[in-house]
Amino acid sequence: MSEVSHAWPRRGQPEQAAEPPRARLAWLANEDWWSVWIGLLVIAVAWALFANGSSLKWLAVAPAKWKTLAEAAQGLAGHWPNYLALFATFALLFGSALAVLGQSLTRFVPSFLILFGLSLMIFTVSAWTQASRYNLEAPLLALALGLLLSNTVGVPEWLQGGLRVEFYIKTGIVLLGATLPLTLLVWAGPVAAGQATIVSLVTFFTIFLTGKALGLDRRFAAVLGLGGAVCGVSAAIATGGAVRAKREQTSMAITLVVVWAIAMIFVLPFASRALGLSTAVAGAWIGTSEFADAAGVAAAQAYGDAARNAGGAIAGAPDAAVQAFTLMKVVGRDIWIGIWAFVLAWVATTRWNTETDGVQAKADIREIWARFPKFVFGFVLASALVTWVAGHYSLADYRKVVTPDLVAPISTLRTWVFTFCFLSIGLTTRLRSLATTGWRPLLAFTVGVVVNIVIGYVLSVHVFADFWNGLGG
């Protein structure tokens, strides 16, 4: 079976990667594994420097707070060697991976240069001391700018080469593991998995049964259902392949996932603030109610940034929003994508095929491994490494030494990668493509969205509120 690329689809079409050469090792054959290697390499280098009394802080540069344009310009001019080195490092890491995967570097590098430049501009604007007053958090600003450009002047084809949404988000999630202790993953895992299972089952069957009631093909209804229940774009692509849905059905499901995921980036943080939710509870709600990792991280980080600049008006630690989201979405929901794909493949091959063409096939259990999000391994390994490092320090020394010299630079690099992702989402999303989906798929998915948000709210804000608030102290 050919590998399916998990790049954010362009113009409503999922990308199909070329069949990798048989001689190529599996762990070099897709972006999932490359996100693991890149993330762990960055963490390993940061740790090696830290262990030898140095730090990655020189490379992990970001604009400082500024009040006037003169201060902003002075800050950029004073650190241009750092930004140049940072661009070269990111271009080398992502470019090398894409070259191995058969992508053209002549397409990637110029596109990534533009992406980096726009991200630096976004970082600079969000560092303005009055930015929080106007809700100019970097994730929302990046998304809004990308959407504006994509849906007005348009994005030239040559720029698409650097807009690798899911490659960036997966790498960022691996880096995120360095900020979440392994003990927290073990502690939160069962609750996150339990909450995710409830939401996933309810959302899937709501969309699937509504779709069938509206007369949609059951394979199409299954793709829509899993796209809303588990992991957005990746789930829709995996399910489309598992049940042998038509390509245009998968494309329509992806369009609905993308549009609703973008809408929730703005709706969920706004609703969380209006309801007075703590950062951790809001992060958990976003984790159960968003439809894509990239969009969910943008929403959670935006709420965390709002809390950081709210002067105590929002309860909980700012980082708890992204932490709770990650535990809920990555630990809780994403790991089920392979299992769901296997189950639906089994149903399609043993039930649906026999009813239509009399052919009975077997679902290969290897489908679970093939569809399992490999970047989760990198996320856990990163968490384990930093947990091991932290074990050699007292809590006071960890906060005084390890956090500023090891964890903080990794967090800054993670924020850069996330910004690449948020901006790429906007630049690759054409809102007018929603018109091609038709009213019945839109209605079925929208019913699932409503149910998903309500169930996620009840579980996060009422049933497990005390648990999630334990992250935000």
Image (cartoon, rainbow, N blue to C red):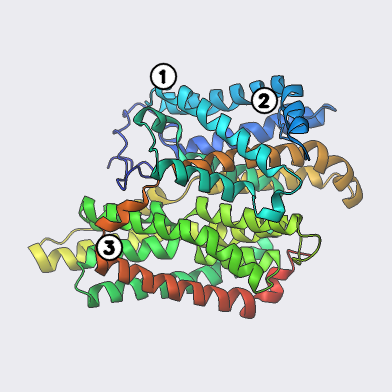
Report the Cα–Cα distance between label 3 and label 1.
Answer: 42 Å
Left or right: 52 as drawn, with respect to 415: right
Neighbours of disc 2 within 10 Å: few (<14), some (14-19), many (20+): many
Give x and y (percent) for residue 399.
86, 47
In what quadrant of the picture does the C terminus appear?
bottom right
Query: Would you say 449 lies left or right of 123 here?
Result: left
In this picture, is 361 found above or below 31?
below
Q: Earlier in the sequence, mark 3 or mark 1?
A: 1
- Residue 242 visible: no
Judging by the rendered image, the residue that carries numbered circle 1 is: 106
Q: What is the distance, in whole Å, between disc 1 and disc 2 at their CAs?
A: 21 Å
Q: CA distance from mark 3 to mark 2?
A: 50 Å
Q: Please, what secondary structure does the residue beneath circle 1 have?
A: helix
* Image point (19%, 66%), residue name: 217
What amino acid type is highlighted by mark number 2?
Tyr
Name above or below for residue 67 compared with residue 357: above
Q: Which of pointers 3 and 2 indicates the residue nearer the eye?
A: 2
- Drawn side of residue 362 relative to residue 394, left or right: left
Name the residue beneath numbered marker 3: 346
Q: Residues within 10 Å of mark 1 (few under 14, many from 20)?
A: few
Point out residue 323 in the picture as x, y percentages from the top left corner: 66, 57
Q: Amino acid at mark 3?
A: Trp
User: Dot 3, how many residues are within 10 Å of its Cα: few (below 14), some (14-19), or many (20+)?
Assistant: some
Q: Measured from the top left, where is residue 338 in percent x and y?
A: 40, 56
Helix, strand or loop for disc 3 = helix
Nearer to the camera, 466 or 45: 466
